[in-house]
C-alpha cells in the first residue's frame, strides 16, 4: 500500500550543522498494517513521518501510496489521503472553534470547500453519534470550544478527526507521549480500534517499548536514519521488552517504562 | 457634547465599523496584525473619489473601492506566503508602496474634493428626506456587510479560514491549502477596509492621501474596545461588538475634542487608547466589562 523507496533527507545542507536525517531508507507497508516505530531521539522517526506527510520535501527517492505518487505533492494535497496526530495535543485542533466545527473541518477533506453551510443538522447528528463511541462525554459538549478540553480529550478528538474522513494512512507521532497514564491508555485503545479499519495503514512512533510490542502487527527500530530491525509474525511474538531494549543503547529512562 | 457631535460620531462610527470588521478578520480570525490597512483605506478612498468625480455611479465606486482593497490585501498575503516575508513587514511594505499607488490613482494630487459629485449619501438623503439619512444609510450598509460576513464565517470556507488563524498545522493536515486561505482572508479583510475608505470619501466629500495614517490603530482600538465592552460569547455577538466598538471609539474621540483636546493630539490619544486596551487584554478576560457583571466565570468551571 505505502511504498517508500530509497528516500534521503539532509537538513542544513552545506552548513556546519548538516545532518543526514534519513539515509537511503526503504519501507513497504501492507494494507491493514499497524506498525510501531521505535528508536532513540534523533534516529529519524519524526522526520520519516514528516517526509511521508509532506512537511519536508525529500532529497531523493519516491513515496507511493497505492497508485498515487506522493513524492512531489504539497502537504495539504497529501493530507487528503493521510490522517495525522501530533505529540502536542494543541496542534491537532483549532482551539478557538467548537468541537463540532473542528469535526466539520476534518470531515470536509474529500468534499469541495465553498460557500455551503459549514454544519448542517444531519452532520451534527452524525458527529454526535460517532463522538459517543469515544465514551468521553464529548457528544454533549459539541458547542464548546476545543480549548476547554483536557489534553487527553483533545488527543482523542484529534485521533477521531484524523480517521473521520477515512484516510488510507494514519500517522501518529508520539501521540500519547504528553498524556497521563489513564488518558494514554484510553487513546491507545482507541488507536487499536481505529487501526482495525479495513485497508488502513497505521504508523505509530512511540518511546514506550511495551506499547511497541503490544500494539499493532509490526515493530520497526530506527537508528541513524535507517531501519535496522523489522519485526513481525512469530519473531515479534517471541520478542520481549528486555530483549528489545538490549537491541539498542538506552539513554532514555522513559523507554524502560 | 452637543447632539450634533453625537450624530456626527455615529455617522463616522458606522463607516469605521466596516473597517473594524476588516481589521477583525486579519487581527483576530487570521491572527495576523495587518498594517496594509493604512494604505488600503486610502486606496478605497482614492478609487471611490475618482469614480465619483468623473460622474460615475457612486455605488459602482464603492464596489470598485472594495475590489481595490482586496487587491492590496492579496499583494500583502502573497509577500507573506510566497516570499516568506513576515506578515508585519509585508504589511509595512505594501502600505509604503500604496502611498505612491494612491497618489497615482488620484492623478498625482494629494487630495480630491467631490463636493459637486453624486455620492451615495447625497442620493440617499434626496430619497428619504431625513436629517438622519446618513445614519440610516450607514446602518443599512453595516447590517448588510455584517450579515454577509457572519454567513460567510459559518460556511465551510469560513470554517477553514477561521481554523487557519487558530492552527495552520491542523488546517494543512485537513487537506486545506492554508496559503490560499491567507490570501482569501487578507483580500476580504482589506476589501472591507477599502469599502470603508470608499464610504468615507463619499461621506466627507474628499479623499486625502494623509487620511490613512494610523487607521490600523483605530481599527485595532475598535476591535479591542468592542470586544472588551460588549463581549465575545458568540460569533455574531463578537461581530456586533466590534462594530459598536468603532462607534464607541468615535464617541470617545468626540468627547476628548469636546473637553478641549487639540485635534493635533488625536494620534497620540489613539495610541494611548489602544495601549490601554491591549494591556487590559493582557490582564485577561477577567477584567473585561461583561465579566465584571458575571459571577466569576462559572461556565468555564464546569469543564
Image (tube, rainbow, N blue to C red):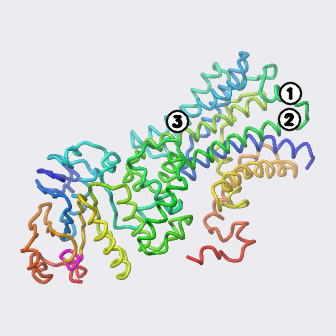
Is A8 on the left-hand or right-hand side of A159?
Answer: left
Mark 2 residue element: helix
Residue located 61% across and 49% down the image: B24
Residue located 56% across and 66% down the image: A144
**How much space separates mark 1 and mark 2, taking CA atoms?**
9 Å
Residue contact at pointers 1 and 2, CB within 8 angstroms? yes
Q: Residues within 10 Å of mark 3 (few under 14, many from 20)?
A: many
**How much space separates mark 1 and mark 3, taking CA atoms?**
39 Å
Residue located 33% across and 49% down the image: A80
Residue located 57% across and 43% down the image: B35
Question: Could you tell me which quadrant the C terminus of chain B lies in?
Answer: bottom right
Mark 1 residue element: helix
Say which residue label 1 marks: B127
Is A245 on the left-hand or right-hand side of B77?
Answer: left
- Main SS category, magenta section: helix
On what subunit does the disc labeled 1 rest? B
Q: Residues within 10 Å of mark 2 (few under 14, many from 20)?
A: some
Q: Residue B186 placed where, x, y %?
A: 53, 41
Say which residue label 3 marks: B94
Q: Say which of marks 1 and 2 sits in front.
A: 1
| In the image, farthest residue toward the left | A235
**How much space separates mark 3 and mark 2, taking CA atoms?**
36 Å
On what subunit does the disc labeled 3 rest? B
Say which residue label 2 marks: B133
Give the residues in magenta. Answer: A208-213
Mark 3 residue element: helix
| In the image, farthest residue toward the right | B2
Is B281 on the left-hand or right-hand side of A99?
Answer: right
On what subunit does the disc labeled 2 rest? B
Amino acid at each position: 500500500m505505502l511504498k517508500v523507496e530509497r528516500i534521503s533527507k539532509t537538513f542544513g545542507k552545506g552548513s556546519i550543522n548538516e545532518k543526514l536525517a534519513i539515509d537511503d531508507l526503504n519501507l513497504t507497508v501492507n494494507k491493514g498494517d499497524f506498525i510501531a516505530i521505535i528508536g532513540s531521539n534523533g534516529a529519524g522517526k519524526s522526520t520519516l513521518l514528516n517526509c511521508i506527510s509532506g512537511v519536508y520535501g525529500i532529497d531523493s527517492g519516491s513515496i507511493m501510496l497505492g497508485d498515487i505518487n506522493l513524492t512531489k505533492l504539497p502537504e495539504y494535497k497529501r493530507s487528503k489521503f493521510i490522517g495525522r496526530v501530533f505529540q502536542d495535543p494543541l496542534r491537532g485542533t483549532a482551539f478557538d472553534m467548537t468541537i463540532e466545527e473542528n469535526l466539520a473541518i476534518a470531515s470536509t477533506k474529500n468534499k469541495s470547500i465553498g460557500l455551503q453551510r459549514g454544519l448542517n443538522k444531519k452532520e451534527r447528528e452524525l458527529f454526535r453519534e460517532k463522538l459517543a463511541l469515544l465514551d468521553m462525554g464529548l457528544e454533549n459538549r459539541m458547542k464548546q470550544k476545543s480549548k476547554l478540553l483536557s489534553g487527553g480529550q483533545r488527543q482523542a478528538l484529534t485521533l477521531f478527526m484524523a480517521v473521520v474522513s477515512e484516510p488510507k494512512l494514519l500517522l501518529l507521532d508520539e501521540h500519547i507521549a504528553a498524556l497521563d497514564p489513564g488518558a494514554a491508555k484510553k487513546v491507545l485503545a482507541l488507536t487499536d480500534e481505529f487501526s482495525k479499519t479495513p485497508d488502513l495503514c497505521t504508523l505509530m512512533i512511540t518511546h514506550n517499548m511495551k506499547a511497541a510490542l503490544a500494539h499493532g502487527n509490526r515493530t520497526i527500530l530506527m537508528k541513524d536514519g535507517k531501519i535496522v530491525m523489522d519485526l513481525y509474525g512469530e519473531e515479534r511474538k517471541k520478542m520481549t521488552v528486555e530483549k528489545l531494549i538490549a537491541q539498542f543503547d538506552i539513554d532514555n529512562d522513559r523507554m524502560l517504562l | 457634547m452637543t447632539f450634533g457631535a453625537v450624530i456626527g460620531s455615529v455617522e463616522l462610527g458606522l463607516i469605521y465599523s466596516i473597517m473594524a470588521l476588516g481589521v477583525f478578520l486579519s487581527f483576530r480570525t487570521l491572527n495576523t496584525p495587518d498594517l496594509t490597512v493604512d494604505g488600503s483605506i486610502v486606496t478605497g478612498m482614492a478609487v471611490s473619489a475618482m469614480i465619483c468625480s468623473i460622474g460615475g455611479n457612486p455605488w459602482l465606486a464603492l464596489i470598485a473601492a472594495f475590489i481595490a482593497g482586496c487587491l492590496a490585501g492579496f499583494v500583502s498575503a502573497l509577500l507573506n506566503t510566497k516570499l516568506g516575508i513576515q506578515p508585519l513587514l509585508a504589511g509595512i511594505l505594501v502600505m509604503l508602496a500604496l502611498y505612491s499607488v494612491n497618489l497615482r490613482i488620484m492623478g498625482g494630487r494629494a487630495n480630491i474634493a467631490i463636493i459637486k459629485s453624486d455620492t451615495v449619501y447625497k442620493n440617499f438623503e434626496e430619497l428619504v428626506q431625513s436629517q438622519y439619512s446618513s445614519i440610516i444609510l450607514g446602518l443599512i450598509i453595516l447590517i448588510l456587510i455584517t450579515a454577509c460576513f457572519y454567513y460567510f464565517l459559518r460556511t465551510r470556507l469560513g470554517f477553514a479560514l477561521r481554523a487557519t488563524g487558530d492552527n495552520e498545522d491542523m488546517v494543512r493536515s485537513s487537506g486545506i491549502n492554508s496559503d490560499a486561505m491567507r490570501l482569501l482572508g487578507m483580500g476580504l479583510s482589506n476589501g472591507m477596509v477599502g469599502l470603508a475608505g470608499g464610504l468615507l470619501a463619499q461621506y466627507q466629500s474628499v479623499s486625502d492621501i494623509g487620511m490613512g495614517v494610523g487607521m490600523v490603530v483605530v481599527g485595532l482600538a475598535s476591535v479591542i474596545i468592542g470586544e472588551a465592552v460588549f463581549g465575545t460569547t458568540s460569533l455574531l455577538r463578537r461581530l456586533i461588538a466590534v462594530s459598536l466598538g468603532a462607534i464607541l471609539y468615535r464617541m470617545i474621540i468626540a468627547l476628548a475634542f469636546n473637553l478641549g483636546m487639540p485635534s493635533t493630539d488625536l494620534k497620540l490619544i489613539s495610541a494611548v487608547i489602544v495601549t490601554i486596551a491591549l494591556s487590559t487584554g493582557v490582564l485577561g478576560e477577567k477584567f473585561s466589562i461583561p465579566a465584571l457583571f458575571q459571577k466569576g466565570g462559572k461556565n468555564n468551571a464546569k469543564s
